[in-house]
Amino acid sequence: MKRMHPFFISALTVDFNIEVFSYPDHTGAPSGMTELCQGSNTTTYILPDNELIMNYTWHVLPDTAASLQPNGATVSAVWNENFYGNAEIFAEPQLAHCPGENSDTLQVWVTGPQHVPEICIVGNDETSGKYMVVWNKLDDASIVAYNIYRESNQAGVYLELRTQPAGDFSVFVDETSSPDVFPHSYRISHTDTCGNVSEMRPPHNTIHLSANIGTGGENNLNGSPYTGIAFLTYDIYRGTEKNALSLLAQINSNVTSYSDFDPPGGMVYYQVVVESDGQCAPTKKALDYNRSSSNIAESGIINVENPGIQMVQVCPNPSNGSFTVSLPESNSFPGSLNIISMTGQLVSTVTFEGTTKTLHMDDLPVGVYTLILTCGERHLTQRLVILK
């Protein structure tokens, strides 16, 4: 008899349907403003409508840059007034039955405080002899112009001389400067695409050099210090012709006076030069923009007709303000008499005729002055001491 197994297996077949939904095309990046100024209020960004996308979840990075107010394929970004820099905006599509692919990211630049520009050096234009402001451009596409300022006749008050487009050569020659008269002080700022003007670094102050004859026949040099860059040494140049000066001495940058006890005869010319660290590289011309020179100061006696002429006499000297300037009888000298302070400032100019001139200058402060008699190419100098 055949035995049956108590269990048996049956196979069932079930029919079911698979529905395939269309997947939307890639949405790309939102459209909207990509360059903003700090403090901008609200901007709108849009993605193209797509019937396969039910909604969008919008994102901004960093999330502190703005608060988002979404409305489907459109979002309003309310910007944080303190935010500046780069922000990213993108959307995450929500499909009916599955997640979508994120949109591309839109980069938004919010212009804010920028790096502060600085002058590289205030040099000297070879053609005009005027002061020349040199700076290196900042690597910032939002800068539209650089602004050059010079200190006015009020201490600490700087007036704008020039607004120079950012694309121009980064050198400005101050045609209104007077290097022979007094030291100048310059500063720089920049203006960006939002109209913001940057802060200014400390100024660059130029050297003004004066020279006078000492009691022992030495030539004494005094100069205002160059400030604005770090340097170690002043180079002092000397010569008997303005265009043929050679290095005389080097002194450390903390010293602003020098006495030349062995000057050549006749009129002697001096100039003080500062060399920077070589980092001045304007965006044009292969010239050296890494030095700043003082005016050329002169000291000594010269007379083309009679090299043996005696020095101009001042009596009494020291004086209380009333004194007589005289020359030997054989040396009539029609011209001008300049009185220069120890800082190089022109105090007074008077005409000089004949061989004698008496002046009453009771308002002259106590100090040491240089008298310069000038007639054409002839120059006579003498020191005057005022004591009261």
Image: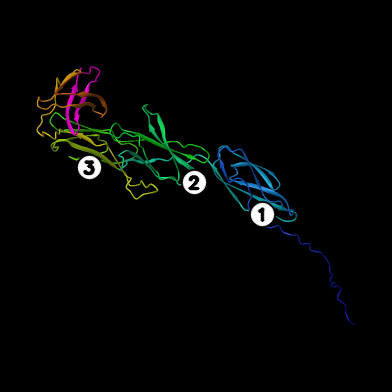
Q: CA distance from mark 3 to mark 2?
A: 43 Å
What range is drawn magenta here?
360-388
Q: CA distance from mark 1 to mark 2?
A: 30 Å
Residue ID at (24%, 37%): 296
Q: Amino acid at mark 2?
A: Ala
Q: Amino acid at mark 3?
A: Asn
First in sequence: mark 3 vs mark 2: 2
The quarter of the displayed image where residue 312 is located: top left
Q: Amino acid at mark 1?
A: Thr
Reply yes or no: does residue 92 show up in magenta.
Answer: no
The quarter of the displayed image where residue 163 is located: top left
Residue ID at (14%, 28%): 215
Q: Tell me the quarter of the image containing the C terminus.
A: top left
Secondary structure state at the residue bearing disc 1: loop
**Closer-to-camera residue (82/313):** 313
Q: Which residue is mark 3?
A: 243
Secondary structure state at the residue bearing disc 2: loop
Give the overall secondary structure of the magenta segment. Answer: strand
- Of the numbered discs in the image, which one, if any, rests on residue 302? none
Q: Is residue 219 left or right of residue 279?
A: left
Decide: is 229 above or below 348.
below
- Of the numbered discs in the image, which one, if any, rests on residue 27? 1
